[in-house]
Amino acid sequence: MEKRKICFVTGTRADYGIMAPLMKRIATEGEAQLQIIATNMHLAPEYGMTVNEIEKDGLRVDARVESLLSGDTPSATVKSMGLTEIGIADAFARLKPDLVVILGDRYEMLAAASAALIFRIPVAHLYGGETTEGAYDDAIRHAITKLSWLHFTSTELYARRIVRMGEDPARVFWAGSLGVDNIRHEDFLPLEELEESIGFQLGERYVVATFHPVTTQPGEEERQTAAMLKGLDDIVEKGWRVLFTMPNSDTGGKRVASMISDWASAHPGQVKAVASLGRRRFYSAMHNASAMVGNSSSGLIEAPAFGIPTLNVGDRQKGRARGESVVDVTCEYDAIAKGLRKVLSPEFRKMISAVPAETLNPYERDGSQDIIYRQLLEAPLSGVKTFYEME
Protein backbone atom coordinates (compact mmCIF):
# COMPACT_ATOMS: atom_id res chain seq x y z
CA MET A 1 0.00 0.00 0.00
CA GLU A 2 1.39 3.40 -1.01
CA LYS A 3 2.01 6.00 1.65
CA ARG A 4 -0.50 8.83 1.88
CA LYS A 5 0.89 11.96 0.20
CA ILE A 6 0.24 14.92 2.51
CA CYS A 7 0.84 18.31 0.89
CA PHE A 8 1.30 21.43 3.03
CA VAL A 9 0.70 24.80 1.37
CA THR A 10 2.53 27.64 3.14
CA GLY A 11 2.56 31.31 2.23
CA THR A 12 4.04 33.18 5.21
CA ARG A 13 6.64 32.97 7.95
CA ALA A 14 3.76 32.73 10.44
CA ASP A 15 1.92 29.69 9.08
CA TYR A 16 5.19 27.87 8.39
CA GLY A 17 6.48 28.54 11.90
CA ILE A 18 3.35 26.98 13.36
CA MET A 19 3.28 23.96 11.03
CA ALA A 20 7.04 23.28 10.80
CA PRO A 21 7.36 20.78 13.70
CA LEU A 22 4.37 18.82 12.34
CA MET A 23 5.92 18.80 8.86
CA LYS A 24 9.22 17.57 10.27
CA ARG A 25 7.46 14.78 12.14
CA ILE A 26 5.77 13.57 8.97
CA ALA A 27 9.09 13.73 7.10
CA THR A 28 11.10 11.88 9.74
CA GLU A 29 8.66 9.22 10.96
CA GLY A 30 8.03 8.02 7.44
CA GLU A 31 4.41 6.91 7.82
CA ALA A 32 3.39 9.30 5.06
CA GLN A 33 5.06 11.23 2.25
CA LEU A 34 5.50 14.93 2.93
CA GLN A 35 5.03 17.47 0.14
CA ILE A 36 5.49 21.24 0.48
CA ILE A 37 4.25 24.04 -1.77
CA ALA A 38 5.73 27.46 -0.90
CA THR A 39 4.09 30.60 -2.23
CA ASN A 40 3.36 34.30 -1.62
CA MET A 41 5.63 35.97 0.97
CA HIS A 42 8.03 33.02 1.13
CA LEU A 43 9.35 33.90 -2.33
CA ALA A 44 9.58 37.68 -1.90
CA PRO A 45 12.95 39.27 -0.94
CA GLU A 46 11.20 42.22 0.74
CA TYR A 47 9.61 39.76 3.19
CA GLY A 48 12.86 37.95 3.93
CA MET A 49 12.77 35.24 1.21
CA THR A 50 11.65 32.86 3.94
CA VAL A 51 11.52 29.85 1.63
CA ASN A 52 15.19 29.58 2.57
CA GLU A 53 14.19 28.96 6.19
CA ILE A 54 12.18 25.93 5.12
CA GLU A 55 15.18 24.45 3.35
CA LYS A 56 17.52 25.34 6.23
CA ASP A 57 15.23 23.23 8.41
CA GLY A 58 16.10 20.26 6.21
CA LEU A 59 12.75 20.11 4.42
CA ARG A 60 12.37 19.85 0.66
CA VAL A 61 10.19 22.38 -1.12
CA ASP A 62 8.43 20.43 -3.87
CA ALA A 63 6.93 23.43 -5.66
CA ARG A 64 7.52 27.18 -5.60
CA VAL A 65 4.54 29.24 -6.71
CA GLU A 66 5.53 32.86 -7.31
CA SER A 67 2.40 34.96 -7.06
CA LEU A 68 2.98 38.12 -5.04
CA LEU A 69 2.68 41.36 -7.03
CA SER A 70 4.57 44.43 -5.89
CA GLY A 71 1.44 46.49 -5.22
CA ASP A 72 -0.84 46.23 -2.20
CA THR A 73 -4.05 47.57 -3.71
CA PRO A 74 -7.24 45.45 -3.84
CA SER A 75 -6.56 44.89 -7.55
CA ALA A 76 -3.03 43.63 -6.86
CA THR A 77 -4.26 41.36 -4.07
CA VAL A 78 -6.92 39.77 -6.28
CA LYS A 79 -4.40 39.29 -9.10
CA SER A 80 -2.03 37.62 -6.63
CA MET A 81 -4.84 35.25 -5.67
CA GLY A 82 -5.31 34.38 -9.32
CA LEU A 83 -1.61 33.74 -9.87
CA THR A 84 -1.55 31.56 -6.75
CA GLU A 85 -4.42 29.44 -8.02
CA ILE A 86 -2.82 29.01 -11.44
CA GLY A 87 0.53 28.00 -9.96
CA ILE A 88 -0.99 25.64 -7.40
CA ALA A 89 -3.04 23.99 -10.16
CA ASP A 90 0.22 23.11 -11.91
CA ALA A 91 1.73 21.87 -8.64
CA PHE A 92 -1.29 19.69 -7.81
CA ALA A 93 -1.28 18.20 -11.32
CA ARG A 94 2.37 17.21 -10.89
CA LEU A 95 2.46 16.17 -7.22
CA LYS A 96 -0.95 14.44 -7.08
CA PRO A 97 -1.38 14.74 -3.29
CA ASP A 98 -3.90 12.67 -1.37
CA LEU A 99 -4.53 15.42 1.19
CA VAL A 100 -3.80 19.16 1.28
CA VAL A 101 -3.11 20.90 4.59
CA ILE A 102 -3.64 24.65 4.93
CA LEU A 103 -3.56 26.89 7.96
CA GLY A 104 -5.51 30.03 8.59
CA ASP A 105 -7.39 32.55 6.60
CA ARG A 106 -5.18 34.42 4.16
CA TYR A 107 -6.15 34.99 0.54
CA GLU A 108 -3.54 32.59 -0.85
CA MET A 109 -5.07 29.83 1.29
CA LEU A 110 -8.47 30.49 -0.25
CA ALA A 111 -6.85 30.08 -3.66
CA ALA A 112 -5.28 26.79 -2.57
CA ALA A 113 -8.53 25.44 -1.13
CA SER A 114 -10.45 26.42 -4.28
CA ALA A 115 -7.92 24.64 -6.49
CA ALA A 116 -8.09 21.53 -4.29
CA LEU A 117 -11.88 21.47 -4.63
CA ILE A 118 -11.70 21.26 -8.42
CA PHE A 119 -8.94 18.61 -8.25
CA ARG A 120 -11.12 16.68 -5.78
CA ILE A 121 -8.30 16.63 -3.22
CA PRO A 122 -9.53 16.69 0.41
CA VAL A 123 -8.41 19.68 2.45
CA ALA A 124 -7.43 19.57 6.12
CA HIS A 125 -7.93 23.04 7.58
CA LEU A 126 -6.33 24.59 10.65
CA TYR A 127 -8.04 26.72 12.23
CA GLY A 128 -11.66 27.29 11.35
CA GLY A 129 -14.54 28.53 13.47
CA GLU A 130 -12.69 31.61 14.70
CA THR A 131 -13.79 35.21 14.20
CA THR A 132 -11.64 38.23 13.41
CA GLU A 133 -14.06 40.99 12.52
CA GLY A 134 -11.34 43.52 11.67
CA ALA A 135 -10.07 41.71 8.57
CA TYR A 136 -11.51 40.23 5.41
CA ASP A 137 -9.69 37.11 6.56
CA ASP A 138 -12.79 36.41 8.65
CA ALA A 139 -14.93 35.69 5.59
CA ILE A 140 -12.07 33.80 3.92
CA ARG A 141 -11.72 31.51 6.94
CA HIS A 142 -15.40 30.54 6.85
CA ALA A 143 -15.23 29.99 3.08
CA ILE A 144 -12.27 27.65 3.54
CA THR A 145 -14.26 25.72 6.15
CA LYS A 146 -16.92 24.92 3.55
CA LEU A 147 -14.20 23.85 1.08
CA SER A 148 -12.51 21.52 3.57
CA TRP A 149 -12.93 17.86 4.53
CA LEU A 150 -11.08 17.71 7.87
CA HIS A 151 -11.26 20.48 10.45
CA PHE A 152 -8.88 21.12 13.35
CA THR A 153 -9.89 23.87 15.76
CA SER A 154 -8.02 25.74 18.46
CA THR A 155 -10.88 25.77 20.99
CA GLU A 156 -13.91 23.64 21.75
CA LEU A 157 -16.22 26.58 20.99
CA TYR A 158 -14.80 26.85 17.48
CA ALA A 159 -15.40 23.15 16.89
CA ARG A 160 -19.05 23.61 17.79
CA ARG A 161 -19.30 26.57 15.42
CA ILE A 162 -18.03 24.49 12.52
CA VAL A 163 -20.64 21.83 13.21
CA ARG A 164 -23.29 24.56 13.22
CA MET A 165 -21.99 25.51 9.75
CA GLY A 166 -23.12 22.09 8.53
CA GLU A 167 -19.86 20.13 8.89
CA ASP A 168 -20.02 16.52 10.07
CA PRO A 169 -18.77 16.34 13.70
CA ALA A 170 -16.94 13.09 12.82
CA ARG A 171 -14.55 15.23 10.76
CA VAL A 172 -14.18 18.10 13.27
CA PHE A 173 -11.45 17.85 15.88
CA TRP A 174 -10.74 20.15 18.79
CA ALA A 175 -6.96 20.03 18.77
CA GLY A 176 -5.81 23.21 20.49
CA SER A 177 -3.14 25.48 19.06
CA LEU A 178 -0.11 23.94 17.38
CA GLY A 179 1.76 27.17 18.09
CA VAL A 180 1.22 26.81 21.82
CA ASP A 181 2.16 23.13 21.64
CA ASN A 182 5.36 24.04 19.78
CA ILE A 183 6.33 26.53 22.48
CA ARG A 184 6.26 23.78 25.10
CA HIS A 185 8.95 21.92 23.15
CA GLU A 186 11.04 24.83 21.83
CA ASP A 187 14.70 25.29 22.68
CA PHE A 188 14.93 29.05 23.20
CA LEU A 189 18.01 31.05 22.35
CA PRO A 190 19.75 32.79 25.27
CA LEU A 191 19.13 36.52 25.13
CA GLU A 192 22.75 37.27 24.23
CA GLU A 193 22.66 34.85 21.30
CA LEU A 194 19.35 36.28 20.11
CA GLU A 195 20.78 39.80 20.23
CA GLU A 196 23.83 38.73 18.26
CA SER A 197 21.69 37.03 15.59
CA ILE A 198 19.62 40.17 14.95
CA GLY A 199 22.46 42.65 15.45
CA PHE A 200 20.65 44.59 18.14
CA GLN A 201 20.88 44.87 21.92
CA LEU A 202 17.44 44.31 23.41
CA GLY A 203 18.40 44.55 27.04
CA GLU A 204 16.11 43.64 29.92
CA ARG A 205 13.22 45.97 29.03
CA TYR A 206 11.75 45.47 25.58
CA VAL A 207 8.48 44.67 23.86
CA VAL A 208 7.77 42.71 20.69
CA ALA A 209 5.50 44.62 18.31
CA THR A 210 3.60 43.63 15.18
CA PHE A 211 1.07 45.78 13.38
CA HIS A 212 -0.96 44.85 10.31
CA PRO A 213 -3.49 46.91 8.33
CA VAL A 214 -7.11 46.43 9.34
CA THR A 215 -8.40 45.32 5.95
CA THR A 216 -12.07 45.99 6.73
CA GLN A 217 -11.18 49.64 7.30
CA PRO A 218 -9.51 50.70 4.03
CA GLY A 219 -7.88 54.12 4.05
CA GLU A 220 -7.23 54.01 7.80
CA GLU A 221 -3.78 52.39 7.58
CA GLU A 222 -1.76 55.59 7.92
CA ARG A 223 -3.77 57.09 10.79
CA GLN A 224 -3.83 53.86 12.77
CA THR A 225 -0.13 53.16 12.27
CA ALA A 226 0.73 56.71 13.31
CA ALA A 227 -1.29 56.28 16.52
CA MET A 228 0.47 52.98 17.25
CA LEU A 229 3.93 54.49 16.73
CA LYS A 230 3.14 57.59 18.77
CA GLY A 231 2.08 55.34 21.65
CA LEU A 232 5.32 53.40 21.41
CA ASP A 233 7.24 56.69 21.38
CA ASP A 234 6.14 57.18 24.99
CA ILE A 235 7.86 54.04 26.22
CA VAL A 236 10.93 54.47 24.00
CA GLU A 237 11.47 57.85 25.64
CA LYS A 238 11.48 56.04 28.99
CA GLY A 239 14.25 53.66 27.92
CA TRP A 240 12.22 50.73 26.61
CA ARG A 241 13.29 49.05 23.39
CA VAL A 242 11.05 47.72 20.64
CA LEU A 243 11.56 44.70 18.38
CA PHE A 244 9.18 45.14 15.43
CA THR A 245 8.27 42.29 13.08
CA MET A 246 7.01 43.71 9.80
CA PRO A 247 3.43 43.31 8.52
CA ASN A 248 2.19 40.66 6.11
CA SER A 249 1.39 41.17 2.43
CA ASP A 250 -2.14 42.37 3.12
CA THR A 251 -3.92 45.10 1.22
CA GLY A 252 -2.41 48.34 2.52
CA GLY A 253 0.53 46.54 4.13
CA LYS A 254 3.28 48.32 2.22
CA ARG A 255 2.32 51.74 3.59
CA VAL A 256 2.27 50.33 7.12
CA ALA A 257 5.68 48.71 6.59
CA SER A 258 7.14 51.94 5.22
CA MET A 259 5.99 53.93 8.24
CA ILE A 260 7.41 51.35 10.64
CA SER A 261 10.74 51.30 8.79
CA ASP A 262 11.00 55.10 8.89
CA TRP A 263 10.15 55.14 12.60
CA ALA A 264 12.74 52.47 13.36
CA SER A 265 15.39 54.41 11.40
CA ALA A 266 14.59 57.49 13.48
CA HIS A 267 15.31 55.54 16.69
CA PRO A 268 18.66 53.78 16.14
CA GLY A 269 19.70 51.69 19.11
CA GLN A 270 16.18 51.77 20.51
CA VAL A 271 14.06 50.13 17.80
CA LYS A 272 14.79 47.19 15.51
CA ALA A 273 12.49 46.27 12.62
CA VAL A 274 12.94 42.89 10.93
CA ALA A 275 11.20 41.33 7.94
CA SER A 276 11.18 37.88 9.54
CA LEU A 277 12.65 36.35 12.68
CA GLY A 278 11.80 32.72 11.94
CA ARG A 279 10.10 30.49 14.48
CA ARG A 280 12.95 29.92 16.94
CA ARG A 281 14.08 33.55 17.10
CA PHE A 282 10.50 34.80 17.33
CA TYR A 283 9.69 32.47 20.21
CA SER A 284 13.01 33.33 21.87
CA ALA A 285 12.18 37.03 21.57
CA MET A 286 8.78 36.43 23.14
CA HIS A 287 10.34 34.32 25.89
CA ASN A 288 12.46 37.26 27.06
CA ALA A 289 10.04 40.12 26.29
CA SER A 290 8.03 42.13 28.80
CA ALA A 291 4.94 42.28 26.58
CA MET A 292 3.58 41.96 23.05
CA VAL A 293 2.01 44.99 21.41
CA GLY A 294 -0.01 45.36 18.21
CA ASN A 295 -2.75 43.45 16.42
CA SER A 296 -1.27 40.06 15.59
CA SER A 297 -3.01 36.81 16.50
CA SER A 298 0.25 35.84 18.22
CA GLY A 299 -0.62 38.28 20.98
CA LEU A 300 -3.78 36.34 21.76
CA ILE A 301 -2.58 32.79 21.10
CA GLU A 302 1.16 32.47 21.69
CA ALA A 303 2.01 35.35 24.05
CA PRO A 304 -0.08 33.95 26.95
CA ALA A 305 1.93 30.72 26.71
CA PHE A 306 4.98 32.75 27.72
CA GLY A 307 3.12 34.33 30.63
CA ILE A 308 3.55 37.83 29.20
CA PRO A 309 0.80 40.43 28.75
CA THR A 310 -0.52 41.61 25.39
CA LEU A 311 -1.75 45.03 24.37
CA ASN A 312 -4.16 44.26 21.55
CA VAL A 313 -4.67 47.39 19.48
CA GLY A 314 -7.76 48.07 17.37
CA ASP A 315 -10.29 45.80 15.70
CA ARG A 316 -8.22 43.33 13.66
CA GLN A 317 -8.64 40.54 16.23
CA LYS A 318 -12.15 41.54 17.29
CA GLY A 319 -14.24 38.47 18.13
CA ARG A 320 -11.33 36.09 18.73
CA ALA A 321 -11.09 34.34 22.11
CA ARG A 322 -8.63 35.82 24.55
CA GLY A 323 -7.42 35.21 28.10
CA GLU A 324 -6.95 37.59 31.01
CA SER A 325 -3.43 38.60 29.94
CA VAL A 326 -4.81 40.45 26.90
CA VAL A 327 -5.75 44.11 27.24
CA ASP A 328 -7.85 45.53 24.38
CA VAL A 329 -7.62 49.19 23.39
CA THR A 330 -8.89 51.29 20.51
CA CYS A 331 -6.43 52.45 17.87
CA GLU A 332 -6.10 55.93 19.35
CA TYR A 333 -2.95 57.41 20.88
CA ASP A 334 -4.42 58.09 24.33
CA ALA A 335 -5.84 54.57 24.62
CA ILE A 336 -2.60 52.96 23.44
CA ALA A 337 -0.46 55.03 25.83
CA LYS A 338 -2.72 54.16 28.76
CA GLY A 339 -2.75 50.49 27.76
CA LEU A 340 1.04 50.35 27.58
CA ARG A 341 1.32 51.75 31.08
CA LYS A 342 -1.04 49.01 32.28
CA VAL A 343 0.55 45.97 30.60
CA LEU A 344 4.08 47.06 31.51
CA SER A 345 3.24 47.67 35.15
CA PRO A 346 4.59 45.22 37.76
CA GLU A 347 1.09 44.98 39.23
CA PHE A 348 -0.46 43.66 36.01
CA ARG A 349 2.33 41.13 35.44
CA LYS A 350 1.93 39.93 39.03
CA MET A 351 -1.82 39.56 38.48
CA ILE A 352 -1.53 37.40 35.37
CA SER A 353 1.16 35.24 36.96
CA ALA A 354 -1.49 34.05 39.43
CA VAL A 355 -4.06 33.16 36.74
CA PRO A 356 -4.47 29.40 36.08
CA ALA A 357 -3.05 28.32 32.70
CA GLU A 358 -6.39 27.10 31.38
CA THR A 359 -7.89 30.54 32.04
CA LEU A 360 -4.88 32.50 30.84
CA ASN A 361 -4.79 30.78 27.45
CA PRO A 362 -7.98 29.30 25.94
CA TYR A 363 -5.94 27.89 23.02
CA GLU A 364 -3.89 25.46 25.06
CA ARG A 365 -4.59 21.72 24.92
CA ASP A 366 -2.25 18.83 25.69
CA GLY A 367 -1.12 16.77 22.71
CA SER A 368 -2.22 19.14 19.95
CA GLN A 369 0.33 17.86 17.47
CA ASP A 370 -0.49 14.20 18.24
CA ILE A 371 -4.20 14.78 17.58
CA ILE A 372 -3.56 16.39 14.21
CA TYR A 373 -0.80 14.00 13.15
CA ARG A 374 -2.86 10.85 13.67
CA GLN A 375 -5.88 12.20 11.83
CA LEU A 376 -3.79 13.36 8.87
CA LEU A 377 -2.45 9.83 8.54
CA GLU A 378 -5.54 7.80 9.39
CA ALA A 379 -8.76 9.76 8.78
CA PRO A 380 -10.92 8.42 5.92
CA LEU A 381 -10.67 10.72 2.91
CA SER A 382 -13.42 9.32 0.73
CA GLY A 383 -17.14 9.90 0.71
CA VAL A 384 -19.66 12.52 -0.27
CA LYS A 385 -19.66 15.71 1.76
CA THR A 386 -23.21 16.53 2.79
CA PHE A 387 -24.63 19.31 4.93
CA TYR A 388 -24.90 18.05 8.52
CA GLU A 389 -28.25 18.93 10.04
CA MET A 390 -28.11 19.44 13.80
CA GLU A 391 -31.01 17.96 15.70
Image: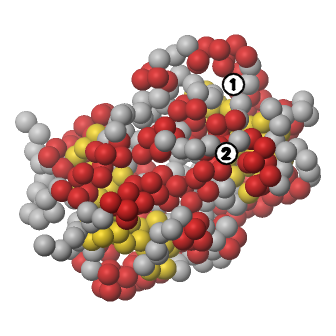
Q: Nearer the viewer, residue 214 or 247?
A: 247
Q: Nearer the viewer, residue 143 or 349?
A: 349
2 and 1 marks in contact (CB < 8 Å): no
| CA–CA distance in space, label 2 to label 1 | 24 Å
Vertical placement of residue 179 versus 11, above or below: above
Callout 1: 10 Å neighbours few (<14), some, many (20+)? many
User: Which residue shows up at 54% across the image and 71% down it?
Assistant: 55
Q: Quadrant of the C terminus?
A: top left
Residue 38: x %, y % from top left: 48, 72
Residue 146: x %, y % from top left: 26, 57
- What number of labels is visible? 2
User: Which residue shows up at 63% across the image and 48% down it?
Assistant: 282
* Left or right placement of residue 255 versus residue 118 in this view: right
Instruction: Work out whether mark 2 precedes mark 1 in sequence or the reverse, and give the earlier one.
Output: 2
* Residue 343 numbered tag: 1
**The disc labelled 2 sits on which kind of residue?**
Leu
Q: Secondary structure at mark 2?
A: loop
* Left or right placement of residue 57 versus residue 359 in this view: right
Q: Secondary structure at mark 1?
A: helix
Residue 280: x %, y % from top left: 60, 50
* Left or right placement of residue 13 versus residue 59 in this view: right
Q: Quadrant of the N terminus?
A: bottom left
* Residue 189 numbered tag: 2
User: Which residue shows up at 77% across the image and 54% down it?
Assistant: 198
